[in-house]
Image: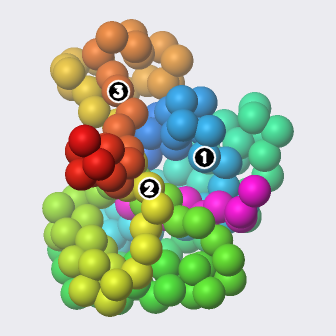
Amino acid sequence: MPKAAYITFLGRSTWALVNAYHAVLREKGFWPEQVYIIAEEPYTESTQKAAGGIGIISESFGLRPEVHLRTVPEADFAGAGRMVGSLVRTLGEEGFVVGLDITSGRKAMVAGALVATARAGLEIRHIYYLAMKSIDNVAKPYMMIPFQIQQIRDFTREQEAALSA
């Protein structure tokens, strides 16, 4: 089984980041050895809390990934693209399969990352998004949110399935 790396963005919601990670482990079976949390400068005060959540959830699955924290300036489309592009390139060269979680990322960071990796021809094997049918009362642990209002999506796999249909 290839090594896995998980890249996620910290925006306004730490719960969104942590819950999406939990859903990816539980529902998709993507178990990373490396986790990268990329935060915009206004949200860096929450990075330790997010890293702690990642650690607790990982341990419940018997995992101990290395957690790395990175920061980019607020709404820095190009900077986010360069950072994620560089990470994806390096991780790919090291033999990692890369999963990118866009759930809690703000638009400029997500768009920058996706545009940069696509233009560079870099492979992101999974693009995860935890979709919520309602945002009422979701600032709590993943397992406490009714499953019927949430769905973990893998846009890359969905696109592959649509193209092969």
**Amino acid on which the number 3 mark rests in the picture:** Gln
Specify the segment rendered in magenta.
1-12
Q: Quadrant of the N terminus?
A: bottom right
**Mark 3 or mark 2, which is nearer the start of the sequence?**
2
Distance from label 2 to label 3 (Cα)? 15 Å
Q: Which residue is mark 1?
A: 30
Rendered residue at 34%/84% (across/down): 121
Q: Residue at x 39, y 10 (%)?
A: 146
Instruction: Identify the residue under disc 3.
Output: 151
Answer above or below: position of 58 versus 148. below
Tell me the mark number nearer the camera, choosing from 2 and 3. Answer: 2
Q: Between marks 1 and 3, how big is the CA–CA gap?
A: 15 Å
Q: Position of residue 12 (x, y in %)?
A: 29, 50
Of the pair 63 and 93, the residue shown nearer to us: 93
Give the side of residue 107 with respect to residue 32, left or right. Answer: left
Q: Is residue 114 magenta?
A: no
| Towards the viewer: 123 or 148 | 123
Taking depth in this image into account, of 37 and 81 the one nearest to the observer is 81
